[in-house]
């Protein structure tokens, strides 16, 4: 059994399992949306002194921060007990494209060229991690949600604003992938 | 101890995101290059099953475990914040290869660099809070 779930999961299992997570939260009286946690963290750190955007009862969202703690634990469990220790099986075309950028074929889940700690002071890493993280935090709050809140919860509820947001996600992602990455590396 | 169930669902979510490889920078690159169905399949199946479940919950007026009727809040109308904010997020998503949830999953997985991405993402949200009144919504 452990051996079975330690293999990478196919998309139809994964997508189904994500829907289960969403409905568990819904039946707990909550909703599935991850990016609000950055707002709660800012509020918990005293952000209300700087903007009324952080002036609310963040403690009423402690369930969401507990969910966040769980996700860290889930990653730890997967990495220590449920791994097959293989590189991600991405397509040959992607491997070739990334090799043109100087990124080697996967030997784990994340590329060492971007997430290896010894590379932290290289320009590509500073741009991709530091600037990339900033844009994720800024953009998700402006858009009012991320992949979970818009692409999954929002589209599930047939929300046109979420469809517009998802189109935006792809406009931005395509610009970075096809125009910016070749300049960064 | 009412909170423990949220930790458990979070653990489940972290395992799913790891084993689906949806936390992988490589997978996000593959998605934005349209070179595999994998990520589209994951998000598509979740959204379609989500839509079926949401419709059923509405049709049968189902209640949550506290006995309250389940409500799905509609997103506020408009398009600017969704298009502009969504595009900014997309720029960052293809850089970090991670949306907010996977940043924390990857950190737990042992990729410590994501602590830096989480810190700057929180900073990004903080700066949004400072300037939001000047942005179109």
Image: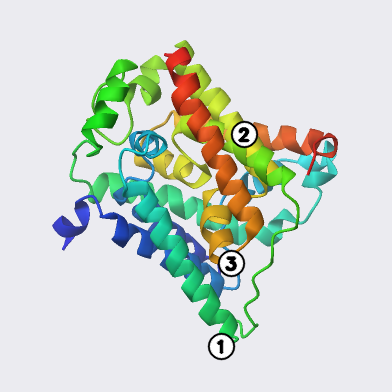
Q: Residue at x 55, y 36 (%)?
A: A171
Chain letter of disc 3 in the image: A
Name the foreground residue: A143 vs B5. Answer: A143
Q: Is residue B45 above or below residue B128?
A: below
Q: Quadrant of residue A135?
A: top right
Q: Which residue is mark 2?
A: B88
Q: Quadrant of residue A63?
A: bottom right
For this view, does B72 lie left or right of residue A76? right
Q: Which residue is mark 3?
A: A157
Chain letter of disc 1 in the image: B
Q: Is residue A183 above or below residue A150?
A: above
Q: Which residue is mark 1?
A: B60
Q: Residues within 10 Å of mark 2 (few under 14, many from 20)?
A: many
Give a yes or no on whether discs 1 and 2 share a subunit: yes
Instruction: Give how far apart the Cα atoms at labels 1 and 2 are.
Output: 38 Å
Residue A88 screen position, x and y as percent: 25, 38
For this view, does B29 lie left or right of residue A63? left
Name the foreground residue: A60 vs B103. Answer: B103
Determine the secondary structure under disc 1: loop
Determine the secondary structure under disc 3: loop
Q: Residue at x 39, y 15 (%)?
A: A119
Give a yes or no on whether discs 3 and 2 share a subunit: no
Q: Residues within 10 Å of mark 3 (few under 14, many from 20)?
A: many
Q: Residue at x 55, y 31 (%)?
A: B91
């Amino acid at each position: 059994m452990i051996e079975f779930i330690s293999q990478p999961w196919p998309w139809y299992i994964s997508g189904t399992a994500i829907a289960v997570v969403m409905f568990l939260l819904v039946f707990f009286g909550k909703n599935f949306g991850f990016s609000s946690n950055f707002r709660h963290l800012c509020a918990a750190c005293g952000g209300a002194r700087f903007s009324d955007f952080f002036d609310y009862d963040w403690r009423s969202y402690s369930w969401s921060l507990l969910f966040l703690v769980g996700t860290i634990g889930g990653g730890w469990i997967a990495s220590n007990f449920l791994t097959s220790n293989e590189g991600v099986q991405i397509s040959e075309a992607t491997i070739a494209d990334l090799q043109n950028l100087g990124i080697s074929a996967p030997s784990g889940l994340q590329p060492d060229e971007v997430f290896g700690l010894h590379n932290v002071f290289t320009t590509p890493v500073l741009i991709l991690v530091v600037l990339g993280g900033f844009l994720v935090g800024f953009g998700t709050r402006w858009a009012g949600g991320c992949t979970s809140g818009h692409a999954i919860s929002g589209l599930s509820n047939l929300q046109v604003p979420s469809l517009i947001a998802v189109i935006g996600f792809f406009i931005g992602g395509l610009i970075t992938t096809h125009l910016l990455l070749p300049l960064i590396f | 101890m009412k909170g423990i169930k949220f930790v458990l669902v979070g653990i489940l979510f972290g395992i799913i995101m790891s084993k689906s490889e949806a936390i992988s920078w490589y997978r996000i690159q593959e998605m934005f290059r349209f070179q595999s169905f994998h990520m589209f399949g994951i998000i598509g199946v979740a959204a379609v099953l989500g839509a079926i479940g949401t419709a059923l919950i509405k049709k049968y007026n189902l209640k949550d475990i506290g006995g309250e009727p389940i409500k799905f809040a509609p997103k506020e109308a408009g398009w600017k914040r969704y298009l502009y904010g969504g595009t900014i997020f997309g720029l960052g998503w293809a850089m970090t290869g991670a949306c907010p949830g996977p940043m924390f999953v990857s950190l737990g997985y042992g990729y410590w660099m994501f602590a830096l991405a989480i810190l700057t993402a929180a900073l990004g949200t903080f700066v949004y809070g400072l300037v939001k009144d000047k942005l179109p919504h």
